[in-house]
Image: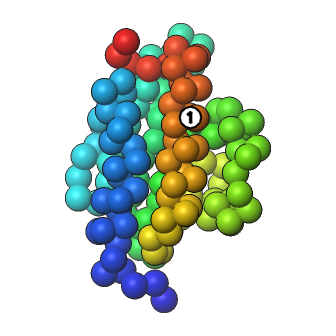
Amino acid sequence: MPDKSNFPALFKELKSLLQKYEFRLTVTVNKTDAYSLDGGFSEKFKRMIFFGSVQIKKNYVSYYLMPVYMFPELLQSVSAELKKRMQGKSCFNFTAADAQLFRELAQLTKKGFDKFKQEKLLVKS
């Protein structure tokens, strides 16, 4: 059974990985247990494009990163250790902090942000 008492600190650490991109994305949720960012409006999909979020769940803290779903080639260089944390195509679950995996997740988030920028899916220029 995971130690849920560390979930708020874990949430805060994962949230900081996304907060770096607030300047070009839109914060849609900012609570003590959920934080979410959207990109810009997509003509192709006729809606705002979700970028990522962090949420405290019952048994883990989830980090969602939509660019890896939209552009699966971003996952080509991801370590086996980080892939083990994946649930579905764009969600990474954690029950404890892991500095190495968080550094890798930060790099993956930057690649996702850069891809959104390249594809003109950001809100602000």
In the image, farthest residue toward the bottom: 1
Q: Residue at x 23, y 58 (%)?
A: 32
Q: Quadrant of residue 115?
A: top right
Q: Nearer the viewer, residue 110 or 55?
A: 110
Q: Nearer the viewer, residue 57 or 109?
A: 109
Q: Residue at x 60, y 48 (%)?
A: 90
Colour pattern: rainbow
Q: Image quadrant for the C terminus? A: top left
Amino acid tagged 1:
Gly
Q: Residue at x 33, y 77 (%)?
A: 6
Q: Is residue 84 visible?
A: yes
Residue 54: image x %, image y %?
A: 40, 53
Measured along the vertical axis of the image, is residue 76 above or below residue 7?
above
Measured along the vertical axis of the image, is residue 67 above or below residue 88?
above
Q: Is residue 65 visible?
A: no
Where is mark 1, residue-wise? 112
Q: Residue at x 68, y 66 (%)?
A: 81
Residue 11: image x %, image y %?
A: 35, 62
Residue 103: image x %, image y %?
A: 51, 54
Total numbered circles: 1
Residues packed near mark 1 inside 10 Å, few (<14), some (14 to 19) or many (20 plus) = many
SS for dot 1 = helix
